[in-house]
Amino acid sequence: MQRILVTGTNRGLGLEFVRQLLARGDRVIATCRHPGKALALTELAAAHPGHLHTLPLDLASERSIAEAARETAALTDTLDALINNAGMLVSGERFGAVEHKSLVDSFAANVAGPVLLTQALIPLLEKGKSPRVLSITSRLGSIAGTTAFGTPSYAMSKAALNMATRQLAAALAPRGIIVLCASPGWVKTDMGGDNAPVTPHDSVAGLLKVLDAATKNDAGRFVDYKGASIAW
Ligand SMILES: NC(=O)c1ccc[n+]([C@@H]2O[C@H](COP(=O)([O-])OP(=O)(O)OC[C@H]3O[C@@H](n4cnc5c(N)ncnc54)[C@H](OP(=O)(O)O)[C@@H]3O)[C@@H](O)[C@H]2O)c1
């Protein structure tokens, strides 16, 4: 049994992470912006008494991150893993009309939030069993793989999340915490859309294998949901 905190759990991949972690007997702290409206989480909590706690967390808010870290520490002394899953994508951006707000909001939710949350949870992770931090990034954040203009706020923020992964991996290796980032594939969720070829079930099953198998040799890696390296 592991204790795992997951962000962005009211829908999409985050909800699937919670389902699969509970099904295998883990204890989950599931965060989302509005737990009161997250009916699927409420049902899962009823089906798994004592194994699922939900907490409010808006990753774009420094105060919300600090509060969620405090509430997590009140619930548990240790965390074995943190899955920085929540993310946002501004659709419809066009070259020549990229907006300040799109860039700033994307960096707040996709980079600053995961970095500050990771930092705030270090005291709990340090006490975990082979503690790991997995940040869900995207192939669109691959600088090497970028040849066309598209979803710039998202792509730039995921590239920055990839750098954050390297930075955090270096800072946390001496404390025994393994940090890596993984692309989930193109997945059928609100973000991925109906044409996506990968199901949330298969993506999350693969990502959990990556998480479980991570050793110190994987610190600072950028991989896909099957564990294969992606070019930076
Ligand atoms: N689906 C894909 O094809 C794909 C591909 C590559 C990478 N990814 C990445 O995979 C992760 C999960 O994506 P998904 O497909 O499950 O997307 P999704 O269905 O759009 O869900 C996104 C989740 O992130 C949450 N979120 C967004 N901004 C937030 C904030 N400021 N604070 C807290 N939570 C916030 C959303 O909460 P609300 O409901 O409150 O908005 C929602 O729970 C993301 O990091 C995404 O970038 C997805």
Image (cartoon, helix red, strand yellow):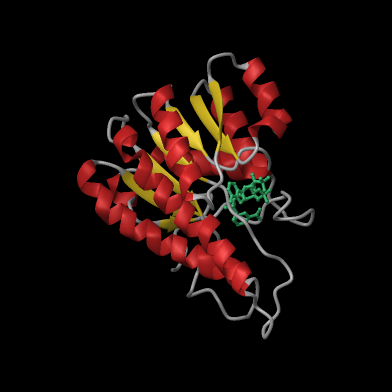
Residue 146 percent across, percent down from the top left: 55, 76
Q: Is residue 94 above or below residue 206?
A: below
Q: Residue 185, located in which quarter of the rendered image?
A: bottom right
Residue 79 percent across, percent down from the top left: 38, 31
Question: Which residue of the protein is positioned furthest toward the bottom in this rendering?
Answer: 96
Q: Is residue 113 above or below residue 210?
A: below
Residue at 43 percent across and 58 percent down: it is 222
Q: Quadrant of the N terminus?
A: top left
Q: Is residue 165 above or below residue 160?
A: above
Residue at 32 percent across and 45 percent down: it is 178
Question: Which residue of the protein is positioned furthest toward the top in this rendering?
Answer: 49
Residue 100 percent across, percent down from the top left: 60, 73
Please indicate whether residue 41 sits to the left or right of residue 146 in the image.
right
Question: Which residue of the protein is positioned furthest toward the left in this rendering?
Answer: 174
Q: Quadrant of the C terminus?
A: bottom left
Residue 228 seen by the camera: no
Please indicate whether residue 107 sits to the left or right of residue 2 in the image.
right
Residue at 70 percent across and 74 percent down: it is 93
Residue at 76 percent across and 55 percent down: it is 193
Residue 191 seen by the camera: yes
Question: Which residue of the protein is positioned furthest toward the front in this rendering?
Answer: 63
Q: Nearer the viewer, residue 212 or 44?
A: 44
